[in-house]
Image (tube, grey):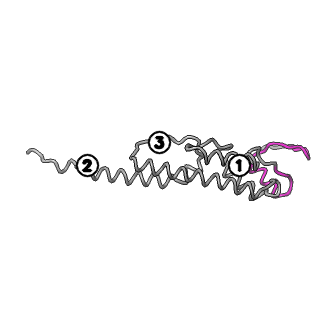
Amino acid sequence: GDLGPFNPGLPVEVPVWLAINLKQRQKCRLIPPEWMDVEKLEEIRDQERKEDTFTPMPSPYYMELTKLLLNYASDNIPKADEIRTLVKETWDTRLAKLRLSADSFVRQQEAHAKLDNLTLMEINTTGTFLTQALDHMYKLRTNLQPSESTHSQDF
């Protein structure tokens, strides 16, 4: 596509794939997103731990962006190791909440659930488990109900 022209020394927003490509060729320096800051991530982690529900994340792709930027441009991100740890702690907290929610959902034999403020990656990590659990619940319910073939038929 058409990108550029770029002026040296002036920041410009580009797609992540291009930023990483330019960084790999040592043609640019990456500026991390505003939320990728130790203080902000500590607040997000602490808020997530306090709340029973899922809190909004700074980006719907926070995990993917963190992984990409720290893998390819950690030298451009201040306190990269602390950021990696904070995002991992937040991720672990959210997945623990999701597992507890899924467990409660299955135990209570609910028919539907509302999943606010989850990212697609978080949903995908438990999607297989939930679909299998719901499938097993359906099979158990249908086996407990008397089938139509056991009723007597009039001739």
Name the magenta segment's main secondary structure.
loop
Q: Residue 36 location, x and y as percent? A: 75, 48
Disc 1 vs disc 3: which is toward the camera?
Answer: 1
Query: Mark 2 or mark 1, which has the lower sequence index?
Result: 1
Give the side of residue 89 with respect to residue 24, left or right: left
Q: Could you tell me residue 11's position as x and y percent? A: 86, 43
Regarding mark 2 in the picture, which secondary structure is present there?
Answer: loop
Which image quadrant is residue 57 in? top right
**N-term-proximal mark, 1 vs 3:** 1
Q: Which mark is residue 42?
A: 1
Indicate the secondary structure of the residue bearing disc 1: helix
User: Mark 1: which amino acid?
Assistant: Glu
Question: Could you tell me which residue is drawn at 66 percent across and 56 percent down?
Answer: 88
94 magenta-colored = no
Disc 3 residue type?
Ala
How crowded pointer 1 is (Cα within 10 Å; few <14, some 14-19, many 20+) is rated as some
Q: Which residue is mark 3?
A: 113
Q: Magenta span covers which residues?
A: 5-30
Answer yes or no: do the residues labelled 1 and 3 have beta carbons within 8 Å? no
Q: Position of residue 53 (x, y in %)?
A: 56, 43
